[in-house]
Image (cartoon, grey):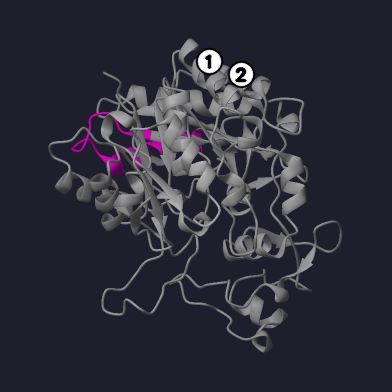
Amino acid sequence: MPNRKVLVSVFSPQEAREAVLGGARIVDSEDPRSALGTIKPRQIMAISDSVLNHARSLDVQLSTNIGEDQLLFKRSPDGRALQKSPYEIAGKAAQAALGVTVAMGHRVHPCPIVKVGLDGMDVGVLTDVLTEVVATLDRTEAHCHTQVMSVLFAQDLDLWAARRTLPGVRRGLVALREFHPADAGPGVFDLREYAVGTLRDADGRVLFTDPGQVDLDSLKDRGVLPEDATHTRVALTELFPHARFGLGSGRRTDREAIRRMVDATARAGADAMMLDTSVLLKVARVGLVSAADSPELVAFEPLDVDAAGLDRRGVLSVADIRFFVDYCHHRGLEANLAGSITSYQAQQLWRLVPHADHVSTRGGASAVQVDPAAPTGGGEDSRLANVIKRDLVRGYVPPEQDGHVCLPERAKGSAGPLVDAMRHRYPDLPLYWADREGRLTEV
């Protein structure tokens, strides 16, 4: 009997309950403000308590992460990790791993999972970091069964270059504060043009509601720009090319990059590897799965467009994803697929790549939050505001756990031929339309 699992990233105890009730078998504590958002230990503890209260009879694991990268101080101008000593990054990462493992505890499951983001590091450095995390956890009596999962961010630099200047992408990334001051050059823009309605304080309140409120002084006063800023020009955070860090030579993740990362993970003694995508690509609607390169998929992606008309794109073909899974198993690792995977992609991947161990989600299992006391008010539809919904989680669980497909309701008018193709190929797979609030209607 397969032991395939869905990992759902949550930010609150209520989201953890929704995830478990929807069929999640790995509940991942994560801040949605980034791809591997670091979360406070007390919040991890609250999520652990919630899972314990609702999943006593289920085999549910906990997971969390120690960030997208372990560069706790600064980078060089070309993005490389800078260490004060040869062991600084590895040492701090191991300390962080111990901390989050203690926060998860072992009451829910004896084998919690620590995800380690390794973006922007040379292969040698990331191998040292993983090795130190694994060895540290193995050395402890209480946490020696903790699993360690490395994370590689798949990338397509050309797709990113084509989408990073789009106004909707800029607004989404400004909301996540994925920018830095910049004097001039390609991609530089005036932050004042995107500040209204996007930037928020620590409590989620909008900082600016009118363009007249936004100037250099107000941006500095509210901590958006540093105190020594002399202008309001900024540039978005950039991807870290694999070629710069010894993972590959191309502008797009390929099998060479996958192989080198899997090999490094195995050498370090870790247990699993996740293929994900950076928050930059997530906001740009570029995910892991490239339907354009995967003729075996029923491709809803061209019809799955956002309010600005931006369709979904992807980085890897199904064949490349199958290679990743097979090579992980060859090296003794579990394989986790993440990166803005949709429900209609997940249900096909479970069938086309049946040996995949995990599929992970956050955005695809979340929707607009509705206040029952004001159900007609309409909530905000954004990465920061959306919440996990159990019916959407069910759209990711594997066939043996009675998963179904959630299709975007906005594609309803033009998706008839694709729906027919899906029904013909997978006649036993239930299909539903999902609206922006996560409510389902049968197709």
Occupied quadrant, residue 195: bottom right
Which segment did they paint magenta?
A: 91-113
Camera-side residue: 17 or 31? 17
Up the image or down, 170 lies above or below 427; here it is below
Estimate the x, y position of residue 365 in percent, counting from the top left. Answer: 40, 50
Mark 1 to mark 2: distance in Å?
7 Å
Camera-side residue: 12 or 226? 12
Q: Amino acid at mark 1?
A: Tyr
Residue that protrudes farthest toward the top in the picture: 330
The residue depicted at 67 percent of the width and 20 percent of the height is 256
Marks 1,2: beta carbons within 8 A: yes
Occupied quadrant, residue 244: top right
Camera-side residue: 138 or 380? 380
- Left or right: where does residue 294 sit relative to residue 355? right
Res. 259 mark: 2
* Quadrant of the image containing the N terminus: top left
In magenta segment, residue 100? yes
Quickly name the residue at label 1. Answer: 327
- Left or right: where does residue 16 sit relative to residue 153? left
Estimate the x, y position of residue 221 in percent, counting from the top left. Answer: 61, 79
Q: Secondary structure beneath disc 2? A: helix
Which class describes the residues within 10 Å of circle 2: few (<14), some (14-19), or many (20+)? Answer: some
Estimate the x, y position of residue 262 in percent, counting from the top left. Answer: 55, 20
